[in-house]
Amino acid sequence: MIEFEHVCKRFGDRVVIDDLSLRIDDGEFFVLVGPSGSGKSTLLRMVNRLVPVDAGSVRVGGEDVLSLDVETLRRGIGYAIQSVGLFPHRTVAENIATVPRLLRWPEERIRERVDELIDLLRLDDPGIGARYPSTLSGGQQQRVGVARALAARPRIVLMDEPFGALDPLTRESLQASLKAIQRDTGTTILFVTHDMDEAFGLADRVGLMLGGRLAQVGTPLDLLRHPMDERVSDFVGGTRARLRELAVRRVRDSMRAGEHADGEPLDADATLQDALGAMLAQGRERLPVHEQGRAVGAIVLGDLVARGA
Ligand SMILES: Nc1ncnc2c1ncn2[C@@H]1O[C@H](COP(=O)(O)OP(=O)(O)OP(=O)(O)O)[C@@H](O)[C@H]1O
């Protein structure tokens, strides 16, 4: 659990975090989103004490971060950033092993963990562990950055625009890997981005930051359907909000259970955006829905349209 209680931060005369309180639950994927300069990175960096608070408190697992030894605190929290920060003179495997080594894990356990992460993050070029960061593509470097952040199985991971510099396809693939890992491990993730689609695709809850305050906190659907004010609805995309909603909602929740359809089946976990794409590609207005290989119903174009999507 991460708790911010009445935290404030100024740089010179400028108030960057303005009396902000927020609680992030264990196992939650929480995304801070907002325009450049709204204070997202500053808030995230208060958790591992890269930025000291001026007032208020930040607690991790119930303990005030100021009461903990700073090195111990940082070793216990994974941290990944856009510029990656891989050590250039260390191999991929050595980079990933950084924190387990600091924690003096036995060599055997470190090797197993490195192999597991190389697998999990689909760093599947043969022999990639022995290569140096400069020989990797940007996407591979980001994957190594994420692997390094997760290596010692921290309960909390902080991620600051970790996929910022990637092309859309690589980015989507990394988002999917991260989401799957987070679901499997129950890691608490605090993730910063200024990309609304990334935020909505990843988050259990989103916190929209404007001018050092949280303008609204809620699930992606809360923000899309019930924006608290005009600033929020402007930011979440006005008319594009309806399209975004398709990317957030799942086939499972809109299908007609038990009904039949012909065509390439869709997975019940696919998004409505995937469903729309598949309908257009196959030229069909209804498609079968499968769950674990079994037909469970049908999804119908008219239903998506009728919902105003
Ligand atoms: N060390 C610092 N000294 C002075 N001003 C700072 C410092 N760190 C951040 N700021 C200022 O605080 C404000 C908030 O910065 P912050 O990086 O938290 O915003 P952000 O929402 O993460 O933006 P971005 O998406 O551009 O990274 C900005 O105006 C920034 O210039």
Image (tube, helix red, strand yellow):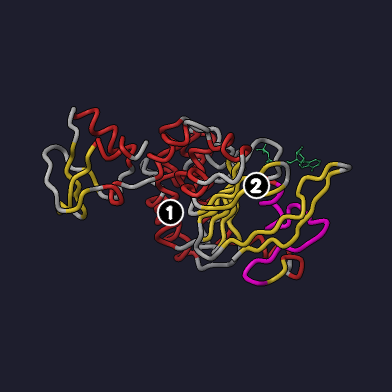
Q: On screen, 304 above or below 179?
A: above
Q: Secondary structure at mark 2?
A: strand
Q: Quadrant of ligand 1?
A: top right
Which mark, by number, is residue 305? Answer: none
Q: On screen, 196 above or below 116?
A: above
Which residue type carries mark 2? Answer: Ala
91 left or right, relative to 278: right
Residue placed at 22% from the left, 43% from the top?
299
Q: Which quadrant holds the C terminus? A: top left
Which mark, by number, is residue 117? Answer: 1
Which percent across, then down, holds residue 19? 76, 55
140 left or right, relative to 266: right
Is residue 84 in view?
A: no
Q: Is residue 49 magenta?
A: yes
215 left or right, relative to 100: right
- The foreground one among 56 and 50 is 56
Magenta-colored span: 42-62
- Reading the image, the residue beneath label 2 is 215
Which residue type carries mark 1? Answer: Leu
277 left or right, relative to 83: left
Comparing labels 2 and 1, the label whose residue is closer to the camera: 2
Q: Residue furthest right?
A: 13
Q: Quadrant of residue 47?
A: bottom right
User: What is the C-alpha distance between the residues marked 2 and 1?
Assistant: 37 Å
- The foreground one among 123 and 218 is 218
Q: On screen, 6 above or below 234?
A: below
